[in-house]
Amino acid sequence: MSKPRILVTGGTGYIGSHTTVELINAGYDVVIFDNLSNSNIEVLDGIEAITGVRPAFIKGDVNDIATLDCLFQAYPGIEGIINFAASKAVGESVQKPLLYYRNNLNSLMNLLEMVEKYQVKGFVFSSSCTVYGEPDVNPVTEESPIKPATSPYGNTKQISEEIITDFIHSGANFHAIILRYFNPVGAHPSALIGELPIGVPQNLIPYLTQTAIGIRKELSVFGDDYDTPDGSCIRDFINVVDLAKAHVIAVKRMIEGKSADKIEIFNLGTGNGVSVLELINTFESATGVKVPHRITGRREGDIEKVWANPERANKVLGWTAETPLADTMRNAWKWQQHLAEKK
Ligand code: WQD
């Protein structure tokens, strides 16, 4: 029996590459479509080294609907799409809102047109806890209020969810699963794939590991005057492989038509709130490596505290984020050391 074919847009990116590995391991035939604007073609070598399979790769932009249509002609029978391809830097989105609205929303609408034209059964959308803004109550459930976005990036996630919902309510015949990620961190335990920030990392973990290895002089902790036990912000740091596995379950659920609902939303988090300073301590004790850091001013737009109630994903998907944070920190460090050896 042929393997179900899944299109992964943005599949050479951080979460896309880890999800591709888990899809291949689960017996799916993966086609990656990526414009390499924020990733590196060498990621395919890592995926092949881990799985023994080199996924089909087409370089292209999801905003180019003609190229996208050619892809569906060249690879018939695509049963599911996981859409990672989007711009994702919160700060950059404030500086370049039109780029973010055009790229993230236009590409989504192109893909949804392909879903209808080629009768794709399932569509997984990569959303974010950023849609909750600064929650009134933690942990947040999928019913927690959607707050006004604090950045164009976050707004594109909220609008994207509405576009998908409206399209399904218009009668489009497919299943959608919206996955709201909390803070994905870490790397594959093989250290053959991981986060590949281009330029100065905006996210905490890549900056932390680059500081630990000496690329950066010290890590700035953006504020310790928040209303939290140690004053630093609190997040729900979820292991990227655990996150990837949730996508495989979501694809299977839709292809096999397991859900009566045409659209489902799940929070993907551990359910544990961890502060920035706690995370630094966890990294140092897990690896034995010190991270020079200093408290600086707050970063504009930062949420004070947000962590997930993942019960719906636990119960409905049968999925739980199970990797201990110390193991995740060790894997993040192994990946940073692998990058240093490659230089
Ligand atoms: C985490 C915490 C910072 C860097 C955003 C998006 C989310 C997702 C991940 C794309 C914050 C602190 C950070 C540093 C620090 N988007 N920090 N020093 O902002 O929670 O989430 O990125 O993948 O949708 O909202 O992630 O890693 O930038 O910050 O103190 O050098 O670490 O203040 O409290 P964030 P982050």
Image (spheres, rainbow, N blue to C red):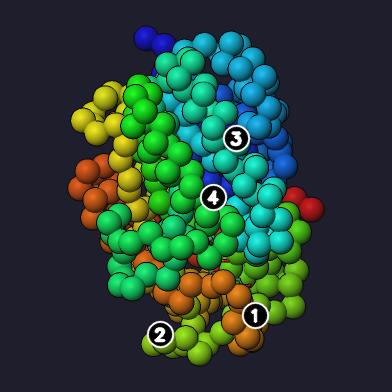
Name the element at disc 1: strand
Residue 279: percent from left, percent from top: 48, 74
Residue occupied by mark 1: 220
Q: Are marks 4 and 2 in contact (CB under 8 Å)?
A: no
First in residue order: circle 4 vs circle 1: 4
Disc 3 under 8 Å from ligand 1? The reply is: no
Q: Residues within 10 Å of mark 4 (few under 14, many from 20)?
A: many
Residue 84: percent from left, percent from top: 54, 40
Q: Amino acid at mark 3?
A: Ser
Disc 1 under 8 Å from ligand 1? The reply is: yes
Q: CA distance from mark 4 to mark 3?
A: 11 Å
Residue occupied by mark 3: 107
Q: Quadrant of residue 265?
A: top left
Which mark, residue 156? 4
Given the current orientation, which residue lies at the most extreme right position?
A: 343
Q: Is residue 291 visible?
A: no
Q: Amino acid at mark 2?
A: Thr
